[in-house]
Amino acid sequence: MRNYSWVFILLFAISSIACGGADKQQKEAANTTENGNQADQNLTEAEYVEQATFTDFDGNKVSISDFEGKVVLIDFWETWCKPCLASFPTMQKVQDEYPDSFVVLAVTPGFTDTKEDAEAFAQEHDYTFKYLMDSNNLHRKLGVQGIPFKVYVDAEGNFIEKSMGTSGPQGDYKKLKKIIKKHK
């Protein structure tokens, strides 16, 4: 019995070191720019969001600043996420109601979905969102652990807030309208 205790302690120590190493690699990846240079590690979450860039399906760079004058909802989602997909009709409804002052960026973090998965979904559905890939790992910089995960940016490009999950169609609708009215 005594020998098994040492084996358990040794396995625990090895797994702790291995997980810590993976965490360090994730942090380094989150702080690396697309050029491979270390990014400013002193940036706040708001600064990461305000400077965020993504990639569209054609490989073009898309920045938050491209949507100045509109309230932006960055919605991290994937095709297999039922709560994500359940919130799409509500986001589309609000985007249709505020076409000049609100835009949805449907951003795939790439947990399991590929560009091709997201592109196939976009082609099969009539949502008019800007479909993008999280090519610069904003989701890691924000510590996204699950989806749906929403990030809100005001019409001047300033970070408002972030939230995980959904409040259901009515709750999401009310929240979006309140944010748009306050920040457009």
Image (spheres, grey):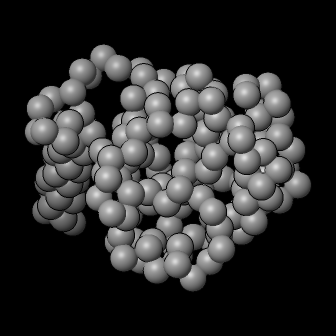
Residue nearer the viewer, 152 or 60:
60
Relative vertical location of residue 73 with respect to residue 153 in this rendering, above or below = below
Can you say which quadrant of the picture contains the N terminus?
bottom left
- In the rendered image, residue 88, in percent from the top left (x then y), is placed at 69, 64
Left or right, 94 with respect to 163, comes to right
Relative vertical location of residue 39 with respect to residue 100 in this rendering, above or below = above
Q: Quadrant of residue 38?
A: top left
- In the rendered image, residue 55, in percent from the top left (x then y), is placed at 35, 53
Left or right, 103 with respect to 3, comes to right
Residue sitting at the far top: 42
Q: Residue at x 63, y 63 (%)?
A: 128
Q: Residue at x 53, y 56 (%)?
A: 130
Residue sitting at the far front: 100
Residue nearer the viewer, 79 or 116:
116
Can you say which quadrant of the picture contains the C terminus?
top right
Whether residue 145 is visible, yes or no, is: yes
Relative vertical location of residue 117 with respect to residue 175 in this rendering, above or below = below
Relative vertical location of residue 122 with respect to residue 177 in this rendering, above or below = below
Q: How many numbered circles are shown? A: 0
- In the rendered image, residue 144, in percent from the top left (x then y), is placed at 46, 46
Q: Residue at x 36, y 76 (%)?
A: 116
Q: Residue at x 56, y 30 (%)?
A: 68
Left or right, 108 with respect to 72, comes to left
